Structures are given as C-alpha cells and as structure tokens.
Amino acid sequence: MAVRPPQLTKPADKDPLAAVLEQEIFNEKAATLSRLNKKLEEALQRLEASGSAQAMTEEDLLPLLAEAGEALWHVTIQRELCGLREHKAFYDFLGVPKSVRLRMGPAKSYQTS
C-alpha cells in the first residue's frame, strides 16, 4: 500500500475573499510594525542625544528610558504577532541599550506636579 503525503491546498481551492482578507491583515501587520519601529528608533535617538548632554540627571533620564522601554515593548509584541520570534539579533541591530531592555513594558507616568 502506497502512502501519499498530504497535499497542500492549491491557491485555486482557496476562497478568493478569504485570500484577500488574509493579504489585507498581513499588510496591516506589516504597516503597524513599520510605524512602531520608527517610534522605537526615535525614542532611542532621543535617549542617545540626552546621554551626550552632561547636565542630564537620573530624574531627567527616567522618562526617556520609560518611553524607549514602552516603544520596545510595543515592537516586540507586534513582531510576535507577525511570527518573528528571535528578538535578540533585532535588539542588537538597533543598538538597544541594556537599560532600555530591562525597562521594556508599560511606561509609568513620570509627570511632576
């Protein structure tokens, strides 16, 4: 008795409306990831620019670290949704500092009254 491997569905077998919807979802995920990457890069640039300013205190740096940590969190979640599971190489490529990686998550409010 011969055993045949399972056949993948052919594109012609797919519902055309389902294929269009899948493509639209993929496009939205990619666009969102692009926007979030841009926000992360901007937050990292602001953090780096403030690091070069010698007059910055720890209290002044906390909001910038929190902003970058939250942006990193958003990018990581979106990468997971897109099926991208290996984050370390991505973080290294962007040059995400360890201090930002440790603060990844929702940002606390650092508003002073």
Image (spheres, helix red, strand yellow):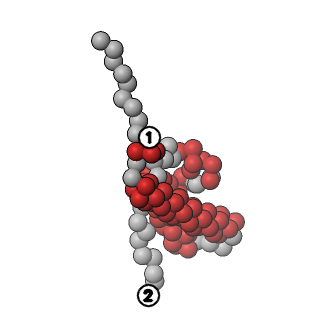
- Does 113 appear above or below 51? below
Image quadrant holding the C terminus, namely bottom left
What's the residue at 42%, 76% (across, down)?
109
Give the number of the mark in front: 1 or 2.
1
* Residue shown at 66% from the left, 73% from the top: 55
Is residue 113 visible to us here? yes
Task: Tell whether label 2 touches label 1 (CB within 8 Å).
Answer: no
Which disc, if any, is residue 10?
Answer: 1
Q: Circle 1: is it few (<14), some (14-19), or many (20+) Cα within 10 Å?
A: few
Any mark on residue 113, and which? 2
Is residue 29 in sight in this rendering? no
Query: Which percent across, then down, holds residue 56?
Result: 62, 72
Q: Position of residue 46 (x, y in %)?
A: 63, 69
Please report the residue visible at 48 percent of the width from the left and 47 percent of the height from the top: 84
**Viewed as shown, does residue 94 lie left or right of 74?**
right
Q: Residues within 10 Å of mark 2 (few under 14, many from 20)?
A: few
* Residue 87 position (above or below residue 54): above
Residue 25: x, y in percent? Answer: 45, 60
Considering only order in the chain, which callout, 2 or 1, is on the residue closer to the N terminus?
1
- Relative placement, left or right, of 95 versus 67 is right
- Label 1 to label 2: alpha-carbon separation: 62 Å
Q: Secondary structure at mark 1?
A: loop
Tell me the tag on residue 19.
none
Q: Is residue 59 above or below residue 16?
A: below
Q: Please name the amino acid that badge 2 sits on.
A: Ser
> Which of the image's four quarters has the N terminus?
top left
Amino acid found under the numbered disc labelled 1: Lys
